[in-house]
Amino acid sequence: MKVIKEFRNDLLKRNEIEVAKNYESNPGFEKVMAEVSSQFKSDADRISIKKISNGFGSNEFIINLLIYDSSDDLKRIETRNRKKKGDKK
């Protein structure tokens, strides 16, 4: 994994990282989560993967992720307020 950008956001207590890696096909969030947690030596509950993308016909995937200082910081900032499909409330 090659780090393209790395930015420390002290206000939100997180590192904002963009990495590039070659894969044969779309790796999926679970596989990327395992590789990122081992490379950056952090727990998976402190990592938030925002986007996995590549150019058409390319094997290089660009991964945007956030690594928080603690899991409480992640839960405080990354809230999900969307309704699930079929939920009437």
Image (tube, rainbow, N blue to C red):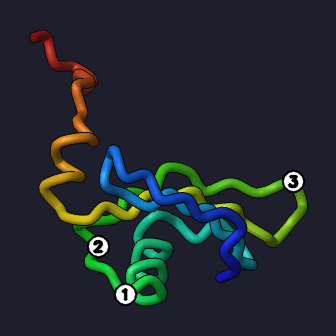
Q: Are marks 1 and 2 in contact (CB under 8 Å)?
A: no
* Sequence-first tag of 3 and 1: 1
Label 3 crowd bin: few (<14), some (14–19), many (20+), radius 10 Å = few
Which quadrant: the C terminus? top left
Label 1 crowd bin: few (<14), some (14–19), many (20+), radius 10 Å = few
Residue type, mark 2 in image: Ala
Quadrant in the picture for residue 55: bottom right
Q: Residue at x 44, y 61 (%)?
A: 15
Numbered badge on residue 44: 2
Q: Residue at x 66, y 74 (%)?
A: 3
Q: Position of residue 60 (x, y in %)?
A: 79, 70
Q: Residue at x 71, y 68 (%)?
A: 4
Q: Nearer the viewer, residue 68 or 23?
A: 68
Position of 5 compared to 81: left or right? Answer: right
Against 73, residue 36 (above or below) is below
Numbered badge on residue 41: 1
- The answer to whether one can see residue 79 in this image is yes
Quadrant in the picture for residue 41: bottom left
Against 9, residue 69 (above or below) is below
Q: Nearer the viewer, mark 2 or mark 3?
A: 2
Mark 3, secondary structure of its residue:
loop
